[in-house]
Image: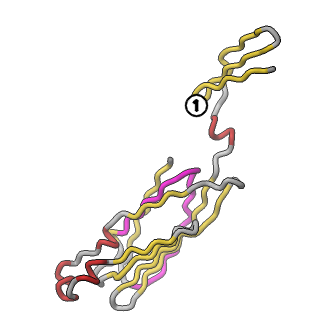
Amino acid sequence: MNSYSLSLSTTASSGIQILPLLEMEDYSKLSLDMSQVYNKTIPIYVEIDWGDGKKEIFDNDTYGNRIYNELLFMNYNPCLTDIHTHEYYPSETCLYKLMTLQILVKYSNGDVTYFQMPIKIRTYDFFDSIGRLKLINVNILKNQLEYQFETSTGLIEMKTP
């Protein structure tokens, strides 16, 4: 599995950021660090649309359970300080899979911060997953040949009828 990390940051509680294309290889895990997103105004929730049909909403439970003034003193925002992760799977039918990651941060003053990032996932084909083939042995038997190949992932044995 490939791992990717994305760190988001803003300087205000409202705005739109279009991020550059993220190209991932095959089965991948994406981690979002939102600890640098503006938090002087209290965020109510973070909504993440991962782009592959999965949506998650992370509520700021502290905001809902505490008195507003007490929370301003604490300045604790679990929906922004937690690392959010998601696993992306490659396409079963094509070489590339295109999608868009969308993140919405809703604040207590009514402001909204919106992030959008296109994601491109490349599916390994047969030759990428095997790597280079090296013939290391041939056995000639009665009416049959056995080949042994070495690859970057291990050994492959092949027999002919």
Q: Position of residue 143 (x, y in %)?
A: 82, 12
Q: Is residue 132 above or below residue 81?
A: above
| Residue 99 image position (x, y, % from top left) | 61, 66
Q: What amino acid type should be assigned to the residue bearing mark 1?
A: Ser
Quadrant in the rendering for residue 5:
bottom left
Is 93 left, or right, of 68 in this rendering?
right
Q: Give the side of residue 60 with respect to residue 137, left or right.
A: left
Residue 12, given in percent of the width and then of the height, sits at 36, 82
Q: Nearer the viewer, residue 32 or 21?
A: 32
- The residue most toward the bottom is 109
Q: What color scheme is it?
A: secondary structure
Q: Image point 61% across, 28% down: which residue? A: 151
Read off the residue under disc 1. Answer: 152
The quarter of the rendered structure image containing the C terminus is top right
Tell me which segment is drawn in magenta. 14-34
Examine the residues drawn in magenta and state their main secondary structure: strand
Helix, strand or loop at mark 1: loop
- Residue 110 position (above or below residue 45): below
Q: Determine crowd level at label 1: few under 14, some 14-19, many 20+ residues with C-alpha closer than 10 A.
A: few
Q: How many marks?
A: 1
Q: Residue at x 25, y 82 (%)?
A: 65
Instruction: Decide which of 95, 37 is in the foreground and name it.
Output: 95
Give the residue drawn at x 57%, y 28%: 154
As for residue 111 lying within the magenta part, the answer is no
* 145 sits to left or right of 14: right
Q: Tell me which residue sits at (52%, 53%) in the image.
A: 28
Which quadrant of the view contains residue 71? bottom left
Image position of 142 (left or right of 69)? right
**Residue 15 is a magenta residue:** yes
Where residue 14 appears, as percent x and y from the top left, is 41, 85
